[in-house]
Image (cartoon, rainbow, N blue to C red):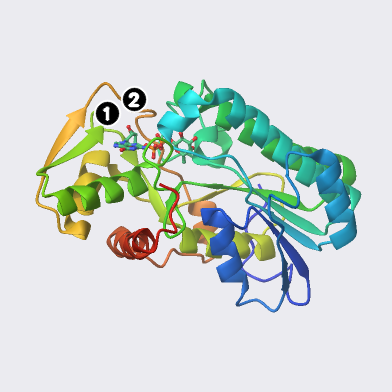
């Protein structure tokens, strides 16, 4: 496996950098992070170019000619949204990534980073999960549609690298959270769901916090601003066929997360389990030794990240700017 370099073989300075998915949580964090680089950031709204439309993507890319692309556009959601809309998760993600990656080859993009997800790994992969655990066992059924699309995306990058010499790489982040997250309870991931539920319980004086599943699955959480920093790090320092894991190297049971959320929101409540809801995969702690070896470290603790996300939620909920 190629190592992640400690030096800086690819420079963003002076480059036109397309952030696909700039309105999403990761895309908007990338735009914030790239402001510190001396580059021109290219973005395009869905109303102008639907990334599922091949001709529209090809035309826009041919016109804009980015040097580098962060492919952070995707249909994403929590455990319930994944299980409820399998066709949308598979189709839309295949379309978006195939169109953007194909147009990047056609227009001679120098470097592309494709963003995947830790759900690409087998449900019962040995922990922590190293990159080479890919395709060694069956997937977690609640998100296999999304996982299959993400596996196809990373394979497409590998295939263009082999056949056409394209410098396209893939990063597989663990569960992400932070400002810009989706707080719609039917579609969201666990962190925004619990922050919102705890906040609403506090406002209404309720003394319970409902928790889906058994509370025993373990998850690893990375703040989205740390994730964006790791993605820029990889864009500039990594060039290889294998995807690279991005995480913090620690996980915790969902029940412990719920207790941390109660402390963050300052809610005194009993956590009540709803075992009719799915647990999903029991554990997916990433082995991040490749990324660590290049000197990258996350900056935020989970406690600080939850506080930061909660502040963002309260401010945006008050001003009516949230997806709820
Ligand atoms: O974050 P989450 O929806 O996604 O759920 P996954 C994580 C865990 O939190 C599961 C539990 O065990 C849920 O049952 N949980 C407890 C809750 N209460 C809640 C709640 O109110 N809302 C939610 N959403 N969960 C996703 C995949 O899996 O992870 C995606 O479906 C993607 O494809 C993403 O890979 C990173 O970690 O289970």
Res. 62 visible in picture: yes
Residue 194, above or below 215: below
- Residue drawn at the location 57% of the way across and 70% of the way down: 33
Q: Nearer the viewer, residue 189 or 297?
A: 189
Q: Which mark is residue 213?
A: 1
Say which residue appears at 51% left-offset and 24% top-offset: 139
* CA neighbours of label 1 inside 10 A, class few (<14), some (14 to 19), many (20+): some
Alpha carbon distance from label 1 to label 2:
5 Å
Q: Earlier in the sequence, mark 1 or mark 2?
A: 1
The picture places residue 318, in percent across and down from the top left corner, at 34, 62
Q: Secondary structure at mark 2?
A: loop
Instruction: Give the percent coordinates (x, y) of residue 156.
Output: 75, 37
Left or right of 290: which side holds 194?
left
Label 2 within 8 A of ligand 1 by Cβ: yes
Marking on residue 278: 2
Q: Confirm or deny contact between disc 1 and disc 2 (CB under 8 A).
A: yes
> Compared to 127, does 321 lie above or below?
below
Which residue: 67% across, 29% down? 91
């Amino acid at each position: 496996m190629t190592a992640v370099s400690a030096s800086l073989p690819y420079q963003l300075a002076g480059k036109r950098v397309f952030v696909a998915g700039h309105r999403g949580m990761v895309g908007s964090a990338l735009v914030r992070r790239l402001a510190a680089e001396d580059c021109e950031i290219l973005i395009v709204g869905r109303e102008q170019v639907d990334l599922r439309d091949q001709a529209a993507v090809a035309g826009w890319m041919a016109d804009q000619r980015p040097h580098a692309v962060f492919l952070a556009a995707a249909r994403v959601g929590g455990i319930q949204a994944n299980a409820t809309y399998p066709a949308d998760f598979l189709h839309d993600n295949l379309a978006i990534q195939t169109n953007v990656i194909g147009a990047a080859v056609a227009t001679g993009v120098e470097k592309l980073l494709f963003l995947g997800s830790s759900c690409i790994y087998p449900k019962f992969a040995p922990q922590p999960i190293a990159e080479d655990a890919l395709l060694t066992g069956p997937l977690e059924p609640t998100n296999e549609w999304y996982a299959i699309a993400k596996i196809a995306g990373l394979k497409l990058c590998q295939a263009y690298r082999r056949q056409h010499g394209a410098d396209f790489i893939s990063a597989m982040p663990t569960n992400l959270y932070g400002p810009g997250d989706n707080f719609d309870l039917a579609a969201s991931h666990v962190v925004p769901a619990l922050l919102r539920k705890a906040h609403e319980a506090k406002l209404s004086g309720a003394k319970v916090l409902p928790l889906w599943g058994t509370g025993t699955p373990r998850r690893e959480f990375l703040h989205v601003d740390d994730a964006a920093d790791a993605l820029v790090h990889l864009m500039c320092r990594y060039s290889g066929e294998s995807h690279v894991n991005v995480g913090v190297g620690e996980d915790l049971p969902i029940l412990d997360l719920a207790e941390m959320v109660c402390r963050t929101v300052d809610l005194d409540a009993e956590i009540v389990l709803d075992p009719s809801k799915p647990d999903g995969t029991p554990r997916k702690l990433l082995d991040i030794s490749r990324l660590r070896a290049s000197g990258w470290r996350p900056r935020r603790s989970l406690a600080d990240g939850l506080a930061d996300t909660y502040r963002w939620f309260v401010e945006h909920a008050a001003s009516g700017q949230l997806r709820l």
